[in-house]
Image (cartoon, rainbow, N blue to C red):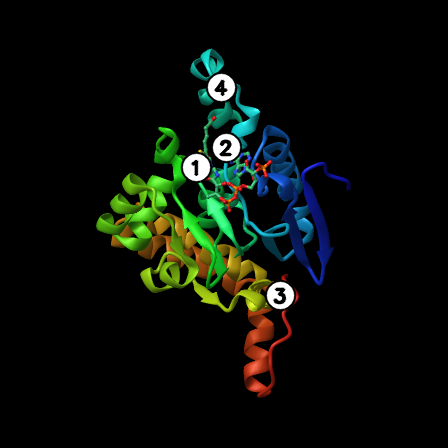
Amino acid sequence: MEFETLNVGLTDDVLDIQLNRPDRLNAINVIMLTELRQVIEELGPSSCAILLRGNERAFCAGQDLKAVDIGDEAAGLDVEGLIDQYYNPLIRLFASSPRPIVAAVRGVAAGAGCSLALAADIVVASDSASFDEAFVRIGLIPDCGASYVLPRLVGQARATAMLMLGEAIDGRTAAEWGLIWKAVPDEESERAARSVALKLARSPSTAIGLIKGALRHSASATLDSQLDHERDGQLAASKSVDFAEGLKAFAEKRPAVFTGK
Ligand code: T3D
């Protein structure tokens, strides 16, 4: 499959998606939003994990601001349509996909680009990466779930400051605050993220998808409802071939070889 704004590969069961508009720091346009959705919907099921990264020096600088006419046109920009038809369905797709999504953040992740990274299940960044809630600097508010995910990850105080002040934090700080899984030296970040994706691709896919669903459910659940959800998920996981393999491997004192079935 050829894409205008993405480089896409599928190797070792990892669907590798590289945002590819480096002249604009991989800023997002409607074509990229459409292609991202298409690739996850059509190729996601053939993979066991998804790796999302940027080309060259940035992860993604958010909405392509040069695709927006300045002046009278800006007031008439169909923001609602863009969000309803493109951005929100993509973020929902990230959440509902049973495949684990790993974001490799090197350089800037700004505005909707930051939201895209934080919509991944696991984020591995370079120490000098920049998580930049840039929206307020151009007079906008956070979207793509930024105001949902941020307070849950870093707490109200830090989320408020990040969103209202629009001051970026680096990868190391993001890891210290719990915004992301980890930050590693710059030259190691993509390799580290890829190895996380590979590990997930070799993991029991049914269980991984169910863990993702359980975490998503917990965001608005009571303990009672979460316990029921876990029971149902455990029942489904226990019927997988991978669970049988896990038990067998344990008894035979060898590493399990999961097949995703
Ligand atoms: O319609 C809606 O629904 C609204 C939705 C909004 C969602 C959003 O994402 S709003 C937030 C949009 N993003 C931003 O506001 C960030 C804009 N970019 C920046 O502030 C800076 O570029 C960075 C801090 C990210 C990086 O700065 P720096 O100095 O490292 O790079 P640079 O020189 O500014 O950028 C390099 C090139 O990329 C440059 O092009 P040029 O001059 O070399 O031809 C720059 O214009 C371009 N670029 C950077 N960000 C964007 C962009 N082009 C289009 N859109 C961008 N967002």
Query: What amino acid is labelled 2 in the image?
Result: Tyr
N-term-proximal mark, 3 vs 2: 2
User: Which residue in the structure is indicated by mark 3?
Assistant: 198
What is the CA distance from the residue labelled 1 to the residue labelled 4? Answer: 22 Å
Residue at screen point 49% across, 19% down:
70
Q: Residue 40, relative to residue 200: is it above or below? A: above
Residue at screen point 66% across, 53% down:
15
User: Which residue in the structure is indicated by mark 2?
Assistant: 87
N-term-proximal mark, 4 vs 2: 4
N-term-proximal mark, 2 vs 1: 2
Q: Which mark is residue 70?
A: 4
Taking the view exactly as shown, the residue that stands out farthest to the bottom is: 253
Residue 59 is situated, as x and y percent measured from the top left of the image, at: 55, 49
Query: Is ligand 1 less than 8 Å from the beta carbon at label 1?
Result: yes
Query: Is ligand 1 less than 8 Å from the beta carbon at label 2?
Result: yes
Residue at screen point 45% across, 58% down:
211
User: Which residue in the structure is indicated by mark 1?
Assistant: 144
Query: What amino acid is labelled 3 in the image?
Result: Leu
Q: Disc 3, disc 1: CB below 8 Å? A: no
- Disc 4 element: loop
Nearer the observer: mark 3 or 1; the answer is 1
**Left or right of residue 18: residue 239:** left
What is the CA distance from the residue labelled 4 to the residue labelled 3? Answer: 43 Å
